Image (tube, helix red, strand yellow):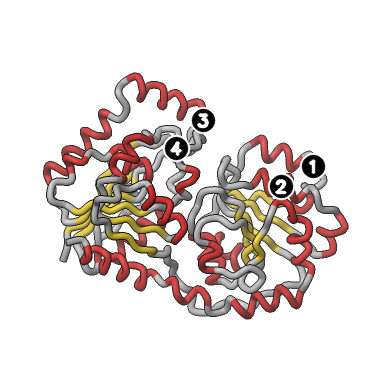
């Protein structure tokens, strides 16, 4: 049994917290696990199987102005002094076998002196080529510190082979680094429902923050026509928080009758939406392997997605999904009219989610830890 610290400190919406929670729960069946994460996520991470330490207020769901104001204050006050003091106390009181960081921000503020005899691991959940973009999700990221700590890791994992290769290029070539592709997982439903493909009921999870791609998708959808949307019986459910600008734009456009703002949903309501949907849309520029994609696959919902992260590593174009290009959007969108084409994808995907069960994923992490000698 190993003593493991999983660190997930987010400056955004905490979108990968479900990944970390599932990993923590499954690992806690074999190891002594402590989750160190945002105070706001304390109730979310509540478990009798593993312990939790809350260390950071991320201003989740606060305005961009407040995030930017905090960014200025932090730079003036020498970055994350108070957060680091809290982390210092935790690492002084505890000796971990494995310290496993699960966010770019956590890696950027980590101090190597806390490592002591521990093995330091980083799992990349965001597309590394976006790590320097100054959007509100990583406005706090100290990139030089991120790179410095990246060169001193003992292990790196990523859900995507190509993202892992990008990370490895940034590490120290002289260090004996262990690395492995470990996908995200999901809880597979007992029964996959049958789908009616005669009309398109699409979901767009994640709302409309700048890197989810909703605004880009809406602009492209406007290049289609009323006749096409009516022909396929199109309805789009936007799940999660949606910026007022995006709501106003849609409400004033001809697309308004075809789009429903579902907002934040309980697990029960989310499952109801999944059961009546047949197309999953992802235009994200950052997520390597979204849980929403895996959940959609487990319910045999057809992915209509951009080629980002691990998506085309686990799915084949026109066999398991529709890969969308901005240059050929209308052509790609018209594929939703072809019932035979959609049925082929539907049949091909019936068993694809079975390879992503959380038990398998946690065993991969446990085996990876054993390699860090």
Using residue 6 as the reference point, say whether residue 67 is left or right of it: right
In the picture, the quarter occupied by the C terminus is: bottom left
- Cβ atoms at labels 1 and 2 below 8 Å apart: yes
Cα gap from disc 4 to disc 1, whole angstroms? 32 Å
- Cβ atoms at labels 4 and 1 below 8 Å apart: no
Using residue 102 as the reference point, say whether residue 305 is left or right of it: right
Q: Which mark is residue 138?
A: 4
The mark nearer the N terminus, 2 or 4, is: 4
In the depicted structure, whether residue 39 falls above or below residue 346: above
Q: Residue at x 16, y 40 (%)?
A: 113
Give the residue pinned by disc 2: 218
Cα gap from disc 3 to disc 1, whole angstroms? 26 Å
Give the residue pinned by disc 1: 253
Q: Residue at x 35, y 50 (%)?
A: 102
Cα gap from disc 1 to disc 2, whole angstroms? 10 Å
Q: Secondary structure at mark 2?
A: helix
**Farthest residue, direction right:** 227
User: Can residue 51 be seen in this snapshot?
Assistant: no
The mark nearer the N terminus, 3 or 1, is: 3
The mark nearer the N terminus, 2 or 3, is: 3
Residue 310 picture location, percent across and down: 50, 61
How would you rate the neighbour count of disc 3 (Cα within 10 Å): few for under 14, some for 14-19, many for 20 or more?
few
Q: Secondary structure at mark 4?
A: loop
In the depicted structure, whether residue 199 falls above or below residue 344: above
In the picture, the quarter occupied by the N terminus is: bottom left
The mark nearer the N terminus, 3 or 4, is: 3
Using residue 76 as the reference point, say whether residue 227 is left or right of it: right
């Amino acid at each position: 049994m190993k003593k493991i610290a999983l660190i997930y400190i987010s400056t955004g919406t905490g979108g990968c917290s479900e990944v970390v929670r599932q990993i923590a729960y499954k690992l806690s069946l074999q190891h002594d696990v402590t989750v160190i994460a945002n105070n706001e996520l304390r109730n979310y991470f509540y478990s009798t199987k593993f312990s939790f330490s809350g260390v950071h207020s991320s201003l989740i769901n606060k305005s961009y102005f407040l995030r930017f104001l905090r960014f200025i204050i932090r730079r003036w006050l020498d970055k994350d002094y108070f957060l680091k003091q809290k982390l210092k106390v935790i690492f002084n009181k505890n000796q971990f076998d494995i310290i496993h960081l699960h966010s770019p921000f956590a890696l950027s503020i980590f101090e190597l002196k806390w490592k002591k005899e521990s093995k330091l691991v980083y799992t990349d959940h965001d597309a590394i080529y976006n790590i320097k973009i100054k959007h509100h999700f990583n406005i706090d990221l100290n990139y030089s510190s991120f790179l410095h700590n990246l060169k001193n890791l003992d292990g790196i994992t990523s859900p995507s082979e190509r993202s892992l290769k990008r990370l490895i290029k940034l590490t120290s070539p002289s260090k004996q680094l262990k690395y492995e592709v470990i996908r995200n997982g999901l809880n597979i439903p007992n029964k996959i429902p049958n789908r009616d493909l005669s009309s398109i009921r699409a979901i767009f999870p994640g709302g409309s923050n700048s890197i989810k791609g909703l605004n880009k998708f809406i602009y492209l959808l406007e290049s289609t026509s009323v006749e096409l949307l009516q022909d396929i019986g199109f309805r789009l459910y936007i799940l999660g928080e949606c910026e007022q600008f995006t709501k106003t734009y849609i409400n004033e456009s001809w697309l308004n009758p075809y789009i429903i703002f579902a907002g934040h949903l309980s697990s029960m309501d989310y499952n109801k939406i999944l059961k009546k949907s047949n197309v999953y849309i992802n235009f994200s520029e950052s997520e390597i392997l979204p849980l929403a994609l895996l959940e959609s696959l487990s319910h045999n919902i057809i992915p209509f997605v951009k080629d980002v992260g691990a998506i085309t590593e686990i799915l084949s174009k026109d066999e398991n999904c529709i890969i969308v290009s901005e240059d050929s959007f209308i052509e790609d969108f018209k594929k939703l009219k072809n019932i035979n084409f959609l049925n082929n994808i539907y049949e091909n995907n019936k068993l694809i989610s079975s390879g992503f069960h959380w038990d398998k994923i946690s065993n991969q992490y446990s085996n990876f830890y054993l390699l860090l000698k």
